[in-house]
Image (spheres, rainbow, N blue to C red):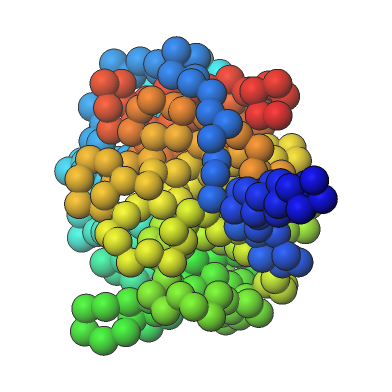
Amino acid sequence: MNKLFTLVVLVVVTILWSCTGNTGTEKHQNRRNNITDVQERVQEIEIEDVMIGSSARLQLMDDYLVIQDFRSDDLLIHLFNRNNYACVTSAIPKGQGPGEITVMGYIGVNEKKREFYMSDHGKLKIFNYPLDSILNDPYYMPEEKKEIDNIQFPSEYQYINDTLSFARIIEPTGNVGHNEAAGKWNMQTGEVTKMNYSHPDVEKKRIAIAASLEHGIFVECYINRNLMTIMDLDGNLKYNIYGSNWNSRDPLRHYGDIIFRKDRIIVSYSGGNWNTEEYYPDKLLIFNLDGDYIKTLDIGYRIVDLIYDPQKDRLVFNFEDMIQFGYLALDDDLVD
């Protein structure tokens, strides 16, 4: 009887370990099967006034939803009312001349000054656009904010102030290759300080990043590995969160965008083949701030980009699917 009891205990412990496998900073989660289907809760945002290409990126600023249209041959951004998504204006011409953007990159938002900074990877410059100026003049001539270093530069960044942004840094590794690193970027000086921790077993990094000043944490998710790392704001390791087969070299897309919503980390996730339409994330994984898995929201649409609107407590999406734009209203029951 004692032997039977011991055997049962060992089996239970083994099962629990396979599901979580938590030891200090290392957390293994091989089963993430608490799934809620929310496709019918996704509300379409119907945009009829302008045509926008599929590879669009989203930003929120002041009273506006800003959509970057990377495939546009004319005006590159479109501003919509944040409340009802009515089109307000389009702005910033594409081109190589003065006041035009050659190769549009990321937009960093300075809410305090009501201005944003657009990278032009063709001219290797970042330009400053006051919001009121482009609302009054779609062809506003911007001032140069910063030159871009083509050896080590931020492809995306979370702007805090002119001396601090949390950034995904691009580092060329030859004529065509590159690697990515998480770090802090000083826009004034151009200085880059890499995070103190980088997972030692991942050589080729493809990452998404997000920082929460409120909670004092920095999250790095791997696009090419089933791995999420949680650090403090100096990049000291708190937790490595491993999904199933995290070290596989199969051509799979894993994580996408990272959102903080109250005390939750929400990340888009695919798990599909990199070379097919399954590449796009179509679900959201929800974790607490320590990286413990809570649940999965099955969105049911292929996600290109998403942002969180704290004013409305909703996620706003750009899809590559039957609908192009949509939103999902959140509540505490949905994310718990």
Q: Looking at this rendering, what residue extends furthest in the bottom direction? A: 174
Q: Position of residue 259 (x, y in %)?
A: 59, 43
Q: Position of residue 125 (x, y in %)?
A: 38, 68
Q: Is residue 122 left or right of residue 106?
A: left
> Closer to the camera, 213 or 86?
213
Residue under the point 43% across and 66% down:
247
Q: Quadrant of residue 77?
A: top left
Q: Looking at this rendering, what residue extends furthest in the left direction? A: 73
Q: Looking at this rendering, what residue extends furthest in the right direction? A: 2
Residue under the point 44% across and 27% down:
299
Q: Looking at this rendering, what residue extends furthest in the front direction? A: 1
Q: Is residue 333 above or below residue 105?
A: above
Q: Quadrant of residue 23?
A: bottom right
Q: Is residue 142 left or right of residue 278?
A: right
Residue under the point 75% across and 41% down:
263
> Closer to the camera, 29 or 11?
11
Count of labels shown?
Answer: 0
Q: Is residue 176 left or right of residue 111?
A: left
Kindly tell me whether residue 111 is visible in this rendering: no
Q: Is residue 108 above or below residue 298?
A: below
Residue under the point 32% across and 55% down:
252
Q: Is residue 183 above or below residue 66?
A: below
Q: Position of residue 199 (x, y in %)?
A: 55, 75
Kindly tell me whether residue 73 is visible in this rendering: yes
Q: Position of residue 321 (x, y in %)?
A: 27, 27
> Closer to the camera, 28 or 271?
28
